[in-house]
Amino acid sequence: MQNPKWSGPIATIRERCRKCYACVRNCPTKAIGVFQDAAEVIHHRCIGCGKCLQVCSQNAKVIADAIKETEKILQGKQPVVAVLGCSFPAFFYDVDPAQMVTALRRIGFDEVLEGTAGVEMIAPEYRELINKKNDFPLISSHCPTVVDLIERHHPSLLKNLVPVVSPMVAIGRFIKAHRGKEAKVVYISSCIGGKFEVTSESVQGAIDSVLTYSELNRMLKERNIDPHRLAKTPFSGLPTSTGRTFSIFGGPFNNFGIVNNGLDPNFVATVGEEASLEVIHDLAAGRISPQYVDVRFCNGGCIGGPGRTNRLTSFSKRNLIINYRKQSIPYKPSPHYLKAPEDLKLDRTFNNRQHQLERPSGDAIRRILNETEKFNEQDELNCGSCGYATCREHAVAVYQGLADTRMCLPFSMNQLEEDRTSLEQKYDLAKRALDQEYAGTTIIGNDTRTQGVLHMIKQVGPTPTSVLIRGESGTGKELTARAIHEASLRAEKPLVTVNCTTLTDSLLESELFGHKKGSFTGAVKDKKGLFEAAAGGTIFLDEIGDITPKLQAELLRVLDSGEIKPVGSNKTINVDVRIIAATNKALEEGIAQGWFREDLFYRINVFTITLPPLRSRLNSLQQLVDHFLNLAARRLNKTIHKIDDNARQALTCYHWPGNIRELQNIIERAVVLSPDQVIRLEQLPVVFGELLRKNQGATSARDTGLRQQRDLQAGKIEADLLIHFLRESAGNVSAAARLANIPRRTFYRMLERQKIDSKAYRDKK
C-alpha cells in the first residue's frame, strides 16, 4: 500500500513521485523540497494554493482526507451542522439546492446552512474599515491563501490585512454562538486553503472540519445517495441574498458597498495567481498605494478553487452563481438562529510565520554553479527545467537545502553522456577480459572423444532441449554449456550461471526464483530471481546434484510448466528459459538412495553429454598446453611462448586428477615463475621431475646395458648435486663452484653437459 508522508494538509505519495519537477515549476512560493526519494511539500512555506495538486500528472500530491474526521464527528452525540460554501452552485449545478440539503441530512448532518450568510456578517465590518481614512492600504483577509502568503512570505504587509475573519470562520462562530461550543461545524467548499486556515491560532475552534466538494461526492457515493432523486428540504439558517455573488470576481465589491468602474485607483480587485502575486509585490515595494485591495488567489475567484469537481470554465461558473442569486431558495430557520447572538466576535489577528532561510554568498553561489558545470555567464542557460527561473535561483535553493544539483537538466544530460561513454569503455574492457578468460567458447582437442563432444554440441545447440553435462570436476562443463548457448538461437540473450554448491537452500531459492519484500529477514525490497534475469536465454545449473529435494520440486515445476513462484508470493510468473545442468555425481545412485528425484532426472536427462577426463585424451595435451600458455602469457603480460622438451614430456607422465582446470593452473604458475621466455622442468611442481626421471629410468632399464645404466645414474646424481649447489648459492656459479670445491670452469662444463641453466636458480635459495 502506498502511504503519503504527511507534514501538513498537502502530502506526497513518494512511490508515485517521478521527480519531474512540475510542482517546483508551478509552486508560487517554491514550497517544494526535492529530496532523495521525492519532491515534497515544505509545510512552513506552503500557502495552500493547491497548484502542486493540479499539475502533478502522477497524482503524487494529495490533500489531507477529511472524510474520516467528518465520519467520526457524525458518530458523536453532539449536534453537527453542515455549511455549504458560497461557490457550491457552480459545482452542484445540476442539483437543486434544496435537494442537496436533503442529501446532507441523509449523511447525518442535523442542520444545513449557506456559507453566504458569513459574507453578509462580515460585510458591515469591511464597510466600516474601508470608509475610514487609513494611512496605509487595506488588503482583504477573506482568502486564506492570500493571508498565508503575507504571513509566511511578506510579513511587512501584516498591518495591511483587514483584521476581520473570513466568511467561513464567521459562520462557524455564528453557529457556535447560538448552539454552544459543543456543536460541531463542517464547512464544505472548493478551497484547500480553508484546511490551512482552521489550524491558525487566531481562528481555531470555529470550524471542526473542512470538506472539499470532491470529498463530499465520495461520501454520497459510498452511501449510494443520489441527490437528484431526493425530495427538497429547506435550509436551516437565515435567508441570504447579496452574499451569494461573493465567490465570483466583483462579488466582494458588491457586498462591501464599493462602486468602482475600474478607473478608480483607490480600489483594486484582482483574482488569479499571477495578478495576486503582482499586486502583493507592488504593495510590499510601495509602488502602489490604493485605499483597499481585494485579492483572491484562485482564477475567477472562489469558483476556481483546487477542490473543485468538474471542468466547467470560470465564465460558465460565473453565470451559474449569478443565476443562483436570482433563485428562490426555501428557508426554514431553526428557532435558535432567530435570536441575535450576545457576543459574536468577527475580529482576528495575524502572525509573522516567516521562516527566513540563510542567503548564500556570491562565492557559495559560484561554487554551486561550478558543480553543475556553469563556469561563465554563457553556461547559465536559465532553461527553467529545474523549476527555477534562473540558474542562480536554483543555486540559492541548493544552498538552502530545497533542491539538488541533479535537477539541472543540461548538467544531468552531460553526466549521463559521460556515464554512457564510461560504461561503454568498461564494457569493452570487461568483454576483452572475459574473452581472455574463456577465449570465447573454443573447445580445444583433436582426439576422437573431444571431437565427439563437439559434434553433439553442434547437434543439440540450435534446439530448445534441456541438456545434462556429466563429467569429473575440471573437465570443462561450464565451457561446454557456453558452447551450447553460443550455438543456440538464444545466443543474443543472457547466459546465467549458478553454482548450486555455494549457497544455502533458502538463499539458493531466493537467488533462483526471487523474493517479495518482507518474505524473510533481510528482504527489504522485491528482488527478481535469476530465472527472470535469464528470460529468453539460458540458465546453467552447475552441480545440480547438490540441491535439496524441496528445490528439486520447484525446479521440476519450471521444467514442466515454465512457471516460477518468488519466495513470499502467491502469484506465479511465466519464464522462457532453456536449462542446462551439470554434475560430477552419479545421479542414478542418488535416485536409488533417495536424495535425487527420479522425475527431475528424466526431465533434465533428455540429452546427455559426458566429458572425458584429461588422462583419457592425452593426444590433445600438447595442444591444450600451448593454448593455456598463450592465455596466461597475455593475462600476466609476459612474452613466454615456449616450453622445453623435458617439461612437455613430464606433463605427459602425470595422471591429471584435476583435469583441464589443474592443467591451466599449473601452466599459469609456471609462467609466473619463469625468469625468461621459456618454461622449463624446474618451473613445474617437483612431482613432474620425479615422474619424468622415473619414466626415463624405466625406459633406459629396458633399452641399455650395465655400463650405460651406470653412466645414466651417475649423470642424474651429478645433475642433482649441481642443482643443489646452485640453489644454495642462489644461482651464482662462482659461489656454487666454491661450495662444490671445484674450479669455476669445471663447474661451467658440467652445467653445459647436464643442460642446466643457472639463471633459473637466481634468488631462489
Image (cartoon, rainbow, N blue to C red):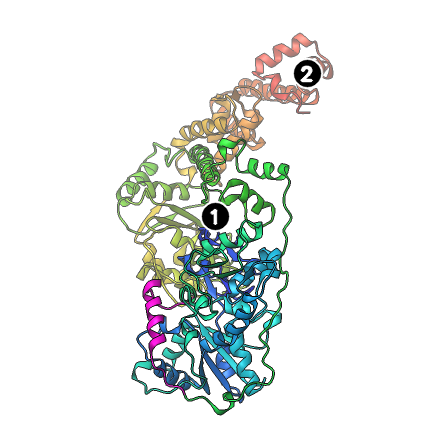
Picture disc at residue 731: none
Q: CA distance from mark 1 to mark 2?
A: 77 Å
Where in the figure is residue 558, as x and y percent of width and height?
35, 59
Q: Nearer the viewer, residue 451 or 386?
A: 386
Where in the figure is residue 92, as x and y percent of width and height?
35, 74
Q: Nearer the viewer, residue 290 or 633?
A: 290
Q: Nearer the viewer, residue 64 or 547?
A: 64
Regarding residue 78, the answer to whether it shows in the image is yes
Q: Residues within 10 Å of mark 2 (few under 14, many from 20)?
A: some
Picture disc at residue 732: 2
Task: Name the residue type under label 1.
Answer: Gly
Q: What range is drawn magenta here?
A: 307-331
Q: Mark 2: which secondary structure?
A: loop
Question: What residue sits right under mark 1 in the picture?
Answer: 387
Marks 1 and 2, the one that precedes in the sequence: 1
Where is the C terminus found, in terms of image quarters?
top right
Q: Nearer the viewer, residue 477 or 638?
A: 638
Residue 38 belongs to the span the image colors magenta? no
Where in the figure is residue 22, as x and y percent of width and height?
44, 52
Vertical position of residue 415 compared to residue 113: above or below = above
Question: Outermost residue, top direction?
Answer: 745
Residue under the image location 51 percent in, 52 percent down: 502
Q: Mark 1: which secondary structure?
A: loop
**Circles 1 and 2: CB atoms closer than 8 Å:** no
Vertical position of residue 70 compared to residue 567: above or below = below
